[in-house]
Amino acid sequence: MSFQNPVFIPGPTNIPESLRKACDMPTIDHRSPLFGQILHPAREGVRKVLKSESAEIFIFPSTGTGGWETALTNTLSAGDKILAARNGMFSHRWIDMCQRHNLDVQVVETPWGEGLPADRYEEILTADTNHEIKAVLATHNETATGVKSDIAAVRRALDAAGHPALLFVDGVSSIASMDFRMDEWGVDVAVTGSQKGFMLTAGLAIVGFSAKAMAATETAKLPRTFFDVHDMAKGYAANAYPYTPAVGLLNGLNEACTMLLNEGLENVFARHTRIAEGVRAAVGAWGLELCAANPSVYSDTVSAIKTPEGFNATDIVTHAAEKYGVAFGVGLGEVAGKVFRIGHLGSLTDVMALSGIATAEMCMVDLGLDIKLGSGVAAAQDYYRGNTATAQKDAA
Ligand SMILES: Cc1ncc(COP(=O)(O)O)c(C=O)c1O
């Protein structure tokens, strides 16, 4: 691996220089109005990135996994029924977390490569006439398979069934990179971390709670201490945390939100789509296929690329690290050895993406796959030449 090359793992992402600098700051009193000048704008920035008018934003020293736990433990009680689909490693891990908290999960097994089955959710919710299901889990972007799901469709399923369950959305690898609409989709808890769309190092769990989720905290009985949102809210009111906050990372988060909002969220999403389209053009030119079943579920932050039967896809990742000093993502769980992943989110340009595509291509040729050197790069170049970034157009 090299410190010089960009990374192509699906998070942590490349970090812009200005964000690295924002995280590197002198110690300040973390129980003071000065800290409030970092904390409150960071929370406000996150709220805007989530596209919410009124969500309560909580930021914990943790990671996305801590965000999952925050959602569950603050709103639910042991034995509560949960509805979830398992279509990849991350949805699997969230389900596992529910089960370890003694929640009763109804799991809809879904082929890896497909999106969440909103129709099936609707059937199950409609049949649940006593409203025993307290929460529905939805992984917006399955990072293991490069599959995005339609959260608006999950909301429609809840509404069509007239069901009051809470909707929890894992947006760890979508928020701040792909379109996410907390209010419009009626998301009750949105979960993410600092190391993906926000382009920082790992270290923060970032969650948004709707008013309905906040109301659920009043009756929820699962034990919680570190992730208690009431303790956190009390701290915020006094420009503080219930414990010691990660001040530098929060300063970085504040700066990241400013960067994203200055670029314009729609431009950020369009940039991710464009870069992803270039990667997909390369995959097509290589004669390979994505794990994602069809274009409607293609992720704009990560592509999981299937390699031919009998070839160990992980060899590409190992070879890229050893020979070229470049990081790609390995396949996880059910698709381990069958796919390798190109992460294309966060701080990334067309030109950086081309270097990743070129490296993947060199590795596949080195390892004997029947791929023409330059074919994927040329396909992506063609795509990028014809689809200039909005921001680049504006600058020109
Ligand atoms: C979709 C998704 N959910 C949850 C997680 C877990 O987040 P973390 O590793 O920050 O705990 C990840 C991590 O990659 C993820 O991609």
Image: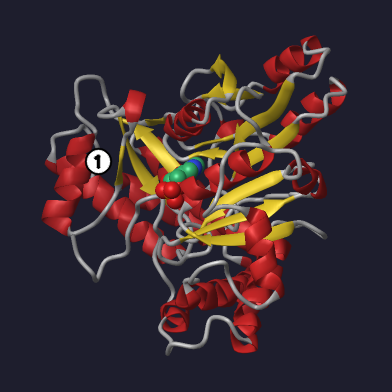
Residue 190 at least partly seen: yes
Q: Nearer the viewer, residue 346 or 77?
A: 77
Kind of residue at disc 1: Lys
Determine whether 83 is above or below 145 in the image: above
Determine whether 13 is above or below 69 in the image: below
Q: Nearer the viewer, residue 396 or 229?
A: 229
Determine whether 268 is above or below 239 in the image: above
Residue named by callout 1: 372
x and y percent of residue 246 in the render?
Answer: 47, 71
Determine whether 24 is above or below 212 in the image: below
Q: Nearer the viewer, residue 374 or 93?
A: 93
Residue in view at x 61 percent, y 26 percent: 116
Residue in view at x 68 percent, y 45 percent: 189
SS label for mark 1: loop
Quadrant position of ligand 1: top left
x and y percent of residue 47 in the render?
Answer: 71, 62
Mark 1: few, some, or many residues within 10 Å (few <14, many ≥20)? some
Q: Quadrant of residue 3?
A: bottom left
x and y percent of residue 338 in the render?
Answer: 29, 27
x and y percent of residue 23 in the render?
Answer: 44, 79
Task: Tell me if 113 is positioned left or right of 289 in this view.
Answer: right
Quadrant location of the N terminus in the rendered image: bottom left
Q: Nearer the viewer, residue 156 or 62?
A: 62
Task: Tell me if 201 is positioned left or right of 133 in this view.
Answer: left
